């Protein structure tokens, strides 16, 4: 196990009707004028936005609203938010939504006090921002942004989807009421399950030896998602299944499951090129990318893939042919994604053109660097993995 620092400063308020406490928590964290950010229509249609703003008003706090954040959030919306915050002298940000709304909030937060263009942070031209404080009312368990240090934004100019990590951008508090997720369509529930599983698997496939405790915790969260996701899809108002998914989303990406090891993250890099170019849901893209990545790299560490197969999918170990055990685990994962009605091939996503070279070049900076840590992938490797997704 490697040396590590674990810091998860977010206060999580979990459970039924938790959103009614938004105002009192904003007060606790010193908010005076809040920007309430939301997405397309779900938060308004469900009445959630009304409950949240009522709670803010009751706490005697002023607020301004900004809706219209789209999935795979874009830079122009971030810039719009920065301008609004400056004009309205906002001192606290609140995201009512999923990863797209939260990431837009985080990006606005690092841009308000920055004199240059906020995109500088995403392309390595700026660092060490001074983010505005922000908080979350989560509506979809998926991206884990409610507890993570990351934000991912797409620059419409060049369709570049890039992430930026900033410890100080972690949400001050995140409100997690599983009931809010009853309205999620089955497709979004499944996309969310795949994304959180991927956040765990990106960390699980590591070259760091002796990480048994973190492995066991990761396997427990994976098994819980494998049980809860179909249950939530079969019965959208199954509180316990929704609750397990919601907490799994946070645990998967708050860095608890990376303690003491180096994660991989190539699948995320490969997927971000897909969602940037084709506008697909991130989780759906990962359902296609992850099995292809696994098939390409599993020989790098067959025992680790056997451990994954036997502990997560209860595959019986074939000691005479460990390669077969490893591959069976990958196929079981693929089967599970299919059971969730997720795509597992590019064609299932309606992608039939071959932009593999372009995407491989983009993700490796025109071949100037590799991606991934478990296995270092060159531009050519990336191209071959995209080929496996056909
Ligand atoms: O816009 P509305 O109408 O709200 O609809 C949304 C959206 O269409 C809908 N939705 C959300 N909550 C709902 C609901 N519909 C009904 N009932 C509810 N309660 O779901 C759709 C997807 O929302 P979105 O926020 O895009 O989903 P998600 O949380 O999966 O976020 C995806 C984004 O996060 C990034 C992804 O790349 C993608 O851009 N990621 C962010 C990460 C981070 N910051 O740490 C890590 C991830 O790996 C990921 O890359
Ligand atoms: Zn993800």
Image (spheres, rainbow, N blue to C red):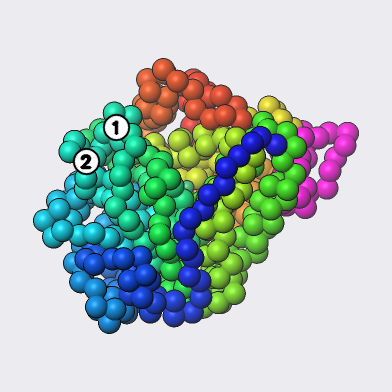
Label 1: element kind = loop
- Check disc 2 and report the residue beneath it: 114
- 93, above or below 60, in the image: above
What SS does tag 2 mark?
A: loop
Q: Residue at x 38, y 79 (%)?
A: 20
- Kindly identify which numbered label has been placed on residue 185: none
Is residue 166 in the magenta section? no
Q: Is residue 197 positioned above or below 128 on the image? A: below
Q: Position of residue 368 (x, y in %)?
A: 41, 17
Q: Residue furthest left?
A: 87
Q: Position of residue 130 (x, y in %)?
A: 30, 44
The residue labelled by disc 1 is 126
CB atoms of marks 2 and 1 within 8 Å = yes
The extreme top residue here reads: 368
Span of residues in magenta: 303-326
Residue pictured at 72% horizontal, 41% vertical: 211
Neighbor class of circle 1 (other Cα within 10 Å; few <14, some 14-19, many 20+) is some
Q: Main secondary structure of the magenta part?
A: helix
Whether residue 151 sits left or right of residue 82 in the image: it is: right
The answer to which of 65 and 202 lies nearer the viewer is 65
Give whichever of discs 2 and 1 has the lower sequence position: 2
Query: Which residue is painted at 51% across and 34% down in the image?
Result: 266
Whether residue 105 can be seen here = yes
Looking at the picture, tell me which residue is in the foreground, 309 or 196.
196
Q: Nearer the viewer, residue 28 or 169?
A: 28
At 49% from the left and 79% from the top, the residue drawn is 16
**Residue 304 visible, this angle:** no
Mark 2 residue crowding within 10 angstroms, few (<14) / some (14–19) / many (20+): some
Query: Image quadrant of residue 158?
Result: top left
Extreme residue toward the right, this view: 320
Q: Taking 198 as reference, is 157 above or below it?
A: above
């Amino acid at each position: 196990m490697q040396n590590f620092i674990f810091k998860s400063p977010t206060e999580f308020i979990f459970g039924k009707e938790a959103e009614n406490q938004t105002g009192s928590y904003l007060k606790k964290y010193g908010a005076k004028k809040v920007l309430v950010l939301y997405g397309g229509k779900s938060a308004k249609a469900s009445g959630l936005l009304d409950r949240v703003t009522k709670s803010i008003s009751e706490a005697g706090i002023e607020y301004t609203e900004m809706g219209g954040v789209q999935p795979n959030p874009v830079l122009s919306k971030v810039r719009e938010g920065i301008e609004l915050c400056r004009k309205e002298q906002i001192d606290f940000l609140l995201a009512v939504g999923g990863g797209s709304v939260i990431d837009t909030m985080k990006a606005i937060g690092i841009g308000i006090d920055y004199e240059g263009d906020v995109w500088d942070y995403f392309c390595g031209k700026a660092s060490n921002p001074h983010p505005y404080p922000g908080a979350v009312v989560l509506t979809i368990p998926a991206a884990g942004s409610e507890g993570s240090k990351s934000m991912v934004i797409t620059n419409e100019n060049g369709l570049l989807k890039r992430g930026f990590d900033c410890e100080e951008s972690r949400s001050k508090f995140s409100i997690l009421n599983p009931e809010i997720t009853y309205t999620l369509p089955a497709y979004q529930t499944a996309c969310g399950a795949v994304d959180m599983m991927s956040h765990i698997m990106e960390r699980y496939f590591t070259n760091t030896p002796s990480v048994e405790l973190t492995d066991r915790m990761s396997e427990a969260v994976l098994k819980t998602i494998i049980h809860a996701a179909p249950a939530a899809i079969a019965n959208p108002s199954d509180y316990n299944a929704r609750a397990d998914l919601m907490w799994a989303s946070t645990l998967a990406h708050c860095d608890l499951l990376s303690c003491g090891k180096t994660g991989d993250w190539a699948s995320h890099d490969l997927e971000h090129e897909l969602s940037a170019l084709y506008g697909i849901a991130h989780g759906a893209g990962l359902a296609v990318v992850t099995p292809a990545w696994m098939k390409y790299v599993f020989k790098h560490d067959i025992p680790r893939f056997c451990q994954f197969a036997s502990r997560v999918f209860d595959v019986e170990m074939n000691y005479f042919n460990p390669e077969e055990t490893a591959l069976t685990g990958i196929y079981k994962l693929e089967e599970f994604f299919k059971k969730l009605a997720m795509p597992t091939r590019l064609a299932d996503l309606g992608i039939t053109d071959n932009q593999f070279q372009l995407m491989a070049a983009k993700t490796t900076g025109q071949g100037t660097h590799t991606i991934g840590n478990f296995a270092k992938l060159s531009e050519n490797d990336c191209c071959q993995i995209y080929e496996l997704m056909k």
